[in-house]
Amino acid sequence: FEGGYKVFIIEEAHMMNEEAANCLLKTLEEPPERGLLLLVTSAPNRLLPTILSRCQMVRFRAIPPDVLAKQLMQVLELDREEAENLAHLSGGSLAAALALHETGGIELKNSVIDRILNAGPSDNFAIAEELIAATPTKGTLDEKREHLFGLLNFLLFYYRDMLVSACGGDIVVINRDRVHDLFERGQQLGRERIERIITAILKTQEIIFMNANFDLALGNMMTEIAGLQRTA
């Protein structure tokens, strides 16, 4: 009011469909005088190129893991090991770390990883149903998508760590509580298979935001992952 600016904040801008994004283009090209539009997104790659080209990118950096771990130890009175695990798994976000702690995210993460690693030849669609069943039963479709996206991130981070381990990289792993099995499984799978698994997970994350059938998308992903793990 005092500054004379009007500020418009569009949360989760990547959730706009193509029609909505195209409707916004004119406003972005000719914004109102003393008007500021902020498009907030965690996935800028899912915005239309025409939207991105009309915006200035401002990145908000993650909180360094050691700083975040100290905050979690103070706020939640956690021991150092648990605080560091949450700090790395949350990607440097205090809000995400608090949410993971509140919902038992570490236990959920490990149960999802163990289920995938021990998948049998006929478990593909059973696991897909289990992942869907883990989403909020009373949530909206968008909330279910976001939850599934988070579950797939657990897998993505794990296989990312496995790839780092298989390549002998000196990069900090996210799954600090599973370091003992990362190297062994990484050596068994090999770099090429791990990269194909990561690609399958990333593709599935994109598909679940395209009004695709969740069962089919997750089932196809599991077919790919299970097949690669069996051949290893």
Image: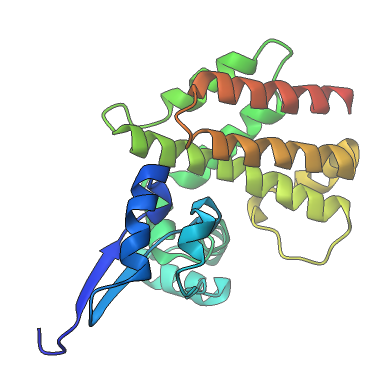
| Residue in the foreground of this view, choosing between 33 and 155 | 33
| Residue in the foreground of this view, choosing between 216 and 68 | 216
Q: Where the C terminus falls, by quadrant? A: top right
Q: Which image quadrant for residue 91? A: bottom right
Residue at 37 percent across and 43 percent down: it is 19
Q: Which image quadrant for residue 13? A: bottom left
Q: Colour mode?
A: rainbow
From the top left corner, tell me how far across and down residue 152 is, in percent.
Answer: 57, 39
From the top left corner, tell me how far across and down residue 141 is, in percent.
Answer: 34, 32
Q: Is residue 86 above or below residue 203?
A: below
* In the displayed structure image, the side of residue 207 where residue 190 appears, left or right: right
From the top left corner, tell me how far across and down residue 36 is, in percent.
Answer: 28, 76
Residue at 88 percent across and 41 percent down: it is 192
From the top left corner, tell me how far across and down residue 180 is, in percent.
Answer: 76, 48
For residue 117, say whether it is visible: yes
Q: Where the N terminus falls, by quadrant? A: bottom left
Q: Which image quadrant for residue 6? A: bottom left
Q: Residue furthest bottom?
A: 3
Residue at 50 percent across and 70 percent down: it is 69
Q: Is residue 39 above or below residue 208?
A: below
Residue at 82 percent across and 27 percent down: it is 228
Total labels: the figure holds 0
* In the displayed structure image, the side of residue 95 where residue 64 appears, left or right: right
* In the displayed structure image, the side of residue 98 where residue 58 appears, left or right: right
Q: Residue furthest top?
A: 122
Q: Is residue 33 above or below residue 211?
A: below
